[in-house]
Amino acid sequence: MAAKIIDGKALAAKLRSAMADEVKGLVARAVRPGLAVVLVGDDPASQIYVRNKTKALAEAGFACFDHHLPADTAEAKLLGLVAELNADRAVDGILVQLPLPKAIDSKRVLLSIDPAKDVDGFHPENLGRLLIGEPRFIACTPYGIMKLIEEAGTTVRGASAVVVGRSNIVGKPVAVLLTAADATVTVCHSKTKDLPAVIGAADILVAAIGRPEFIRGEWIKPGATVIDVGTNRLPSGKLAGDVEFAAAVLRAGAITPVPGGVGPMTITMLLANTLEAARRRAGGC
């Protein structure tokens, strides 16, 4: 029997609809959730991501403050803009779209964002708070992954979870979240021995390595929940995940498609974090 397809688009739409209703209530109290989006340069992929985020913000009733700077923008000017946004009470969250031009130190820029406005959840303070179980903001993709696992009806407590990939953006934070939810977690990477066997024991598999169809369908444990974070552009122009979907869907119990799985949820959880920041502002009004 083919796996249940975990529809990220449908779940994202449901969550955004609920957020839009809450935004109306905040606006009635003179608080409109606001996200500042900073794009430096003309990277085509970044432009698409920013356009999708801006559209989602508008549809949910958020205020969006767009700042599109030329590729030759000096680092000092960008840092100055971030400082202004940190001080602007109308701005609840700040998103600096990556990658930045090579002449700009991305780490320095991200560290300059006020942790209370770091709705991407990338600042070391927010990652540290997540680690000790007192999160302010959860990194958007891991946050979305946990929502997708919940949507699949998967029991996390006591499950064996395998995360393939150890980035600070996805792999490490989602491992922390799964551990906090009482799963037994294994984080895999290029040095992992006998990766197929490790994956074959997973009740929950999160694939986040950026290599198209690297994880073969035959490695999947029958009935497992598979979350495919990969978004890889093939020579044909089509998108493929990190998991061999056609074979995996015949073994898994539930699986996310690419596209239409994790991607819509990442943007949705960015809105959720911005809304949370606005709630805190409303509480202080």
Image (spheres, grey):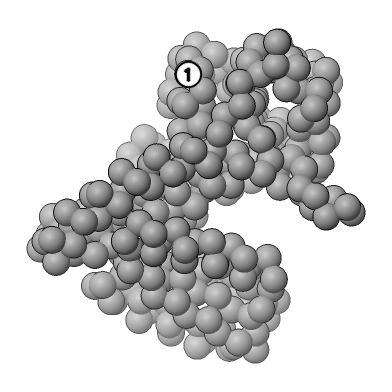
For label 1, the crowd category at 10 Å Cα-Cα, with few meaning under 14, some 14 to 19 and many 20 or more, is few
Determine which quarter of the picture holds residue 115: bottom left
- In the image, residue 42 sits, relative to residue 251, either above or below, namely below
The residue lying at 85 percent from left, 50 percent from top is 234
Q: Position of residue 218 (x, y in %)?
A: 83, 18
Residue 81's place in the image compared with 207, above or below, is below
Q: Residue furthest right?
A: 235
In this rendering, position of residue 29 left or right of residue 263: left
**Is residue 257 in view?**
yes
Picture residue at 64% right of the left edge, 80% below the top: 41
Residue closer to the observer: 126 or 282: 282
- Which residue: 34% across, 46% down? 17
Instruction: Tell me the quarter of the image containing the C terminus.
Output: bottom left
Amino acid, disc 1: Gly
Residue 226, given in percent of the width and then of the height, sits at 64, 25
> Is residue 114 among the parts visible in the rendering?
no
Residue 83 located left or right of residue 171? left
Name the one closer to the observer, 200 or 256: 256
Question: Quadrant of residue 63 in the image?
Answer: bottom left
Q: Secondary structure at mark 1?
A: loop
Q: Quadrant of the N terminus?
A: top right
**On screen, 280 above or below 254?**
below
- Determine which residue is flagged by label 1: 153
Residue drawn at point x = 76 percent, y = 48 percent: 239
Total numbered badges shown on the rendered structure = 1
Location of residue 130 in the rendering, given as x and y in whole percent from the top left corner: 41, 41
Residue 171 placement (x, y as % from top left) = 61, 39
In the rendered view, does 85 fall on the left or right side of 139? left
